[in-house]
Image (spheres, rainbow, N blue to C red):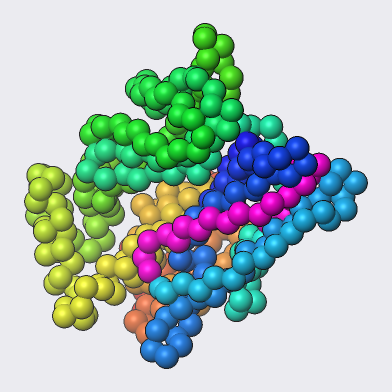
Amino acid sequence: MILFYLILFSIKWQVAYIPSDSNLVEMKLFLEIPPNDLRFTMLDSIMQASYEIQVVVFDKKGDQIAGDYWFRERLIDSSNFYDSLNIIIPNKARRFNLKVIDLSGVEILNVYEDIKPIIFFANVRSKFSNDTLYINFTTINPKNLEAEINISLMGLMEKKALKPGISEDTVYFYLPLTPNGRYETRFILWKEGKRLETYSFFVEIERPFYLDDKTWYLKVSQLEYIATPSELNQLRKAKKEERDSLWKAFWKQYDPTPNTEYNEKEVEYFERIQYADEHFSFGDKGWRSDRGRIYVKYGPPDEIVSRPYELSSKPYEIWYYYRLNVKFIFYDRYGFGEYILINPQGEKI
């Protein structure tokens, strides 16, 4: 059995190869596709997407020796789509091409990979819930080898016996103090003190932002352009069990459609924060910069006059908001990209 794991764009995929007989191998492909990677269209009052998975297998000369394709339809959902496919290929296969094509005309995955001699593990996936990380995996042991699997994560370790044949297994780690982030999990297969295989898999620890202290305090601090000092103080001091309700209560006062769960104002605000971080961080302070503050408070300007290479003056920008009848002037006083607002209240146009 051979396993390969990759994240490309947002799609996760793994492929395992199981000896079928002396000349054939069963190829097992596992896919995890986020719904945001697909284009959903309305059909008979239902939002759905259609896509095709294609696999082409080559020998060492580059000639095609196997291939197949599969058609899928999905209804819109907030969770990822999981798929698994099987194809029988010759054991002389050396390379394959995997494509996922959204049938709206968009190719969302196209990779070529060599077949690599990795064994025993397949279809590794994880889920984080209630401070506990669950890791599910498949072991493929056609020769019924007796061995031990060590699964380690951040200094913690769980041990499992390698089961005969093809089996599903699960381990879990309780991680109440581990911050949100991406972490490496390592699988090591041992037999009589000899390491047979090492395999790494990256897991995501992602709590709701109000349950992760680092994320919570960052998002609260980002409210400084819209919240009062007393509101900020209340949110900073909130206990974990109070945070969600206080956050929703804060944004409720700005919700243009209070009878729906979607708060357009909150979404718009943090889209502006993200834009400011992405566009005003080179030499500047992102959302905390002067340009970031004006952008978050007023949105994109109607016009920007940018003079980055003036001989007779420092680089400067003028932002015009015609709908507000105001303009803001920024200049780069040191020439390193940190633009300072020289008219904090703005000037009438």
- Quarter of the figure that contains the N terminus: top right
Residue depicted at x 50% and y 44%: 123
Q: Quadrant of residue 170?
A: top left
On screen, 194 above or below 108?
A: above
- Residue 265, image x, y percentages: 27, 72
- Magenta stretch prevailing secondary structure: strand
Residue 64 appears left or right of 347:
right
Q: Residue furthest top?
A: 193
Residue 321 appears left or right of 227:
right
On screen, 131 above or below 44?
A: above
Near-viewer residue (104 or 249): 104
On screen, 11 above or below 266?
A: above
Q: Is residue 90 magenta?
A: yes
Q: Quadrant of residue 183?
A: top left
Q: Residue furthest front?
A: 21
- Quarter of the figure that contains the C terminus: bottom left
- Residue 61, image x, y percentages: 90, 46
Please say whether residue 112 is visible from this viewpoint. Answer: no
On screen, 342 above or below 14?
A: below
Near-viewer residue (304 or 242): 242
Q: Residue furthest bottom?
A: 44
Number of on-image labels: 0
Near-viewer residue (37 or 56): 56
- Residue 281, image x, y percentages: 48, 50
Please say whether residue 123 is visible from this viewpoint. Answer: yes
Q: Is residue 215 magenta?
A: no
Residue depicted at x 16% and y 80%: 259
Q: Quadrant of residue 222?
A: bottom left
Residue depicted at x 82% and y 54%: 65
- Residue 181, image x, y percentages: 38, 40
Residue depicted at x 59% and y 28%: 143
User: Which residues fall within the magenta stretch?
Assistant: 77-98
